[in-house]
Amino acid sequence: MNCYVVTFETHSDESRERVRTQLKTYPHFCPIHKYCWAILTDKKAKDIRNDVAAKLDKGERLFVIRSGTEAAWRNTFGDKNSEWLKENL
């Protein structure tokens, strides 16, 4: 499986909740912050984009990128999420 970072910009809480619900359908996921999550999947970036974009309203933004070889962060949503990111990014 590959790790992807998915960032999104929504205009409403309802739209953000639809995106979050969609991201939770992937085998493994970790919220990084309110509008950015990491997921593990065998799917390609364009397939993830299509899955998540179906939950967005017109004019909302989405970016999907496969994780690289190096990452750094500050203030994740707790130790559990920080450990998940260390293991998977």
Image (spheres, rainbow, N blue to C red):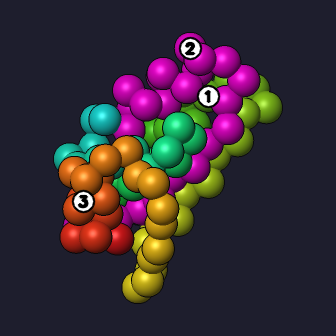
Q: Which of marks 1 and 2 precedes in the sequence?
A: 2
Q: Disc 3 marks which residue?
A: 84
The answer to whether residue 19 is visible is yes
Q: Quadrant of the image for the N terminus? A: bottom left
Q: Position of residue 21 (x, y in %)?
A: 38, 26
Instruction: Identify the secondary structure beneath mark 3.
Output: helix
Q: Position of residue 71 (x, y in %)?
A: 45, 76
Q: Disc 2 marks which residue?
A: 14
Q: Residues within 10 Å of mark 2 (few under 14, many from 20)?
A: few
Query: Which amino acid, by three-letter code, is at mark 1?
Result: Leu
Q: Residue furthest bottom?
A: 69
| Most foreground residue, 58 or 14 | 14
The answer to whether residue 49 is visible is no
Asked if 42 appears above or below 20 in the picture, the reply is below
Query: Which amino acid, by three-letter code, is at mark 3?
Result: Trp
Spatial CA distance of label 3 from label 2 is 27 Å
Asked if 73 appears above or below 16 in the picture, the reply is below
Q: Closer to the observer: label 2 or label 1?
A: 2
Residues in magenta, as a range? 1-23
In this rendering, position of residue 64 left or right of residue 39: right
